[in-house]
Image (cartoon, rainbow, N blue to C red):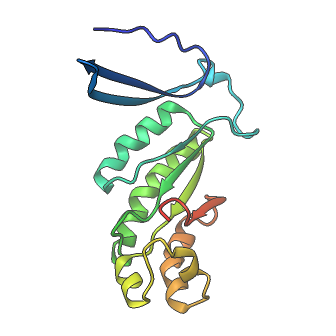
């Protein structure tokens, strides 16, 4: 069965399907939709952002697909999760390499990349007696380990990424 949805205005929408039988809800499904301005090619980047994208936290192997989707959606900015859940500092070099490809593709399209660091690596959280979401408390200490954890990221992206989201999304 097809149901036409007459969405004409850009925005975020949620479609909800509820199946009932004998006065009871039998099933319920929802899907989130984004309607993007059809004139996105004419949109001027660099002015007040009107459309942004929070990229999902995915394995490195899936980032090229997410990058393709992000470029096709042509947002004004895209938030990229730098540290995935369970991220450990030993994986920095590989993760930075994969994210650098995404950042370069976004910059080529004049899409502003924003890196998100919203959780502490589990090994650091446990040794410091912090919860994973307490990234701001850890980075705000001025601790040498905090600087060492951020240093490769700042060296790789410090001159290309103007905005960073530190904490707040998982806490």
Rendered view: 163 above or below 33: below
**Which residue: 34% across, 82% down?**
123
User: Which is nearer the eye, 112 or 86?
Assistant: 86
Residue 69 in percent (x, y) is at 42, 36
Q: Quadrant of the N terminus?
A: top left
**Which residue: 55% across, 33% down?**
74
Would residue 37 be found to the left or right of residue 87 on screen? Answer: right
Rendered view: 120 above or below 37: below
Residue 44 in percent (x, y) is at 72, 31
Residue 34 in percent (x, y) is at 51, 28
Residue 112 in percent (x, y) is at 62, 47
Residue 154 quadrant: bottom right
Residue 41 quadrant: top right
Residue 15 quadrant: top left
Rendered view: 129 above or below 60: below
User: Which is nearer the eye, 136 or 26?
Assistant: 26
The residue sitting at the front extreme is: 23
Please state the total of marks drawn on the protein image. 0
**Which residue: 52% across, 84% down?**
146
């Amino acid at each position: 069965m097809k149901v036409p949805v007459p969405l004409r205005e850009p925005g975020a929408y949620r479609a909800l399907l509820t199946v009932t039988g004998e006065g009871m809800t039998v099933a319920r499904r929802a899907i989130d939709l984004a309607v993007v301005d059809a004139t996105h090619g004419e949109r001027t980047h660099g002015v007040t952002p009107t459309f942004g994208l929070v990229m999902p936290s995915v394995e490195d192997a899936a980032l090229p697909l997410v990058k393709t989707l992000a470029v096709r959606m042509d947002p004004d900015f895209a938030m990229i999760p730098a540290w995935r859940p369970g991220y450990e500092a030993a994986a920095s070099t590989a993760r930075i390499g994969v994210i650098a490809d995404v950042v370069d593709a976004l910059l080529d399209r004049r899409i502003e990349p924003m890196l998100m660091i919203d959780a502490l690596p589990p090994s650091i959280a446990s040794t410091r007696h912090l919860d994973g979401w307490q990234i701001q408390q850890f980075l705000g200490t001025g601790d040498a380990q905090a600087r060492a954890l951020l240093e490769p990221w700042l060296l790789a992206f410090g001159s290309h990424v103007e905005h960073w989201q530190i904490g707040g999304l998982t806490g």
